[in-house]
């Protein structure tokens, strides 16, 4: 496992401390989970963006276009 050191504003550190105490987990565990979730959302958005561009290139722009394409199969 790697170690990451970062600087954060005092307000963010206090919020992390409060949530850590409230959930009974370490600040590291909480920060690790938050980063994991952020990266998953970023990956999803990137994938979605590429898929939307591909669909639009194929003439699919709306939900109705998607349903019409599925009915034709």
Image (cartoon, rainbow, N blue to C red):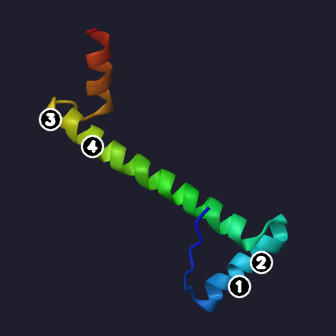
Label annotation for residue 18: 2
The N terminus - image quarter:
bottom right
Give the quarter of the image for residue 20.
Answer: bottom right
Crowd tier of the residue under label 4, counting other residues whose Cα lies within 10 Å: few below 14, some 14–19, many 20 or above: few
Label annotation for residue 14: 1
**Residue 30 located left or right of residue 57:** right
Please tell me which of labels 3 and 1 falls first in the chain.
Answer: 1
Q: Would you say the residues marked 3 and 1 are in contact, meaning their CB atoms lie under 8 Å apart?
A: no
**Residue 21 located left or right of residue 59:** right
Please tell me which of labels 4 and 1 falls first in the chain.
Answer: 1
Give residue 2's position: percent from left, percent from top: 58, 66
Q: Disc 3 and disc 1: Cα gap in Å?
A: 47 Å
Crowd tier of the residue under label 2, counting other residues whose Cα lies within 10 Å: few below 14, some 14–19, many 20 or above: few
Q: Disc 4 and disc 1: Cα gap in Å?
A: 38 Å
- Check disc 4 and report the residue beneath it: 50
Instruction: Name the residue at 21% across, 41% down.
Output: 53
Q: Disc 4 and disc 2: Cα gap in Å?
A: 38 Å
Depicted 38 relative to depicted 18: above or below: above
Give residue 41's position: percent from left, percent from top: 48, 52
Instruction: Name the residue at 50% across, 51% down.
Output: 40
Give the quarter of the image for residue 57.
Answer: top left
Q: Nearer the viewer, residue 4 or 73?
A: 4
Q: Closer to the observer: label 3 or label 1? A: 1
Crowd tier of the residue under label 3, counting other residues whose Cα lies within 10 Å: few below 14, some 14–19, many 20 or above: few
Depicted 40 relative to depicted 67: above or below: below
Q: Nearer the viewer, residue 65 or 24?
A: 24
- Check disc 3 and report the residue beneath it: 57
Q: Disc 3 and disc 2: Cα gap in Å?
A: 48 Å
Name the outermost residue toward the front: 1
Q: Would you say the residues marked 4 and 1 are in contact, meaning their CB atoms lie under 8 Å apart?
A: no
């Amino acid at each position: 496992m790697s170690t990451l050191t970062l600087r954060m504003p005092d307000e963010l550190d206090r919020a992390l401390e409060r949530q850590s105490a409230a959930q009974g987990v370490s600040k590291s565990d909480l920060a690790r989970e938050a980063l994991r979730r952020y990266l998953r959302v970023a990956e999803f958005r990137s994938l979605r963006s590429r898929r939307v561009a591909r669909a639009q290139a194929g003439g699919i722009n709306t939900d109705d276009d998607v349903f019409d394409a599925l009915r034709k199969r």
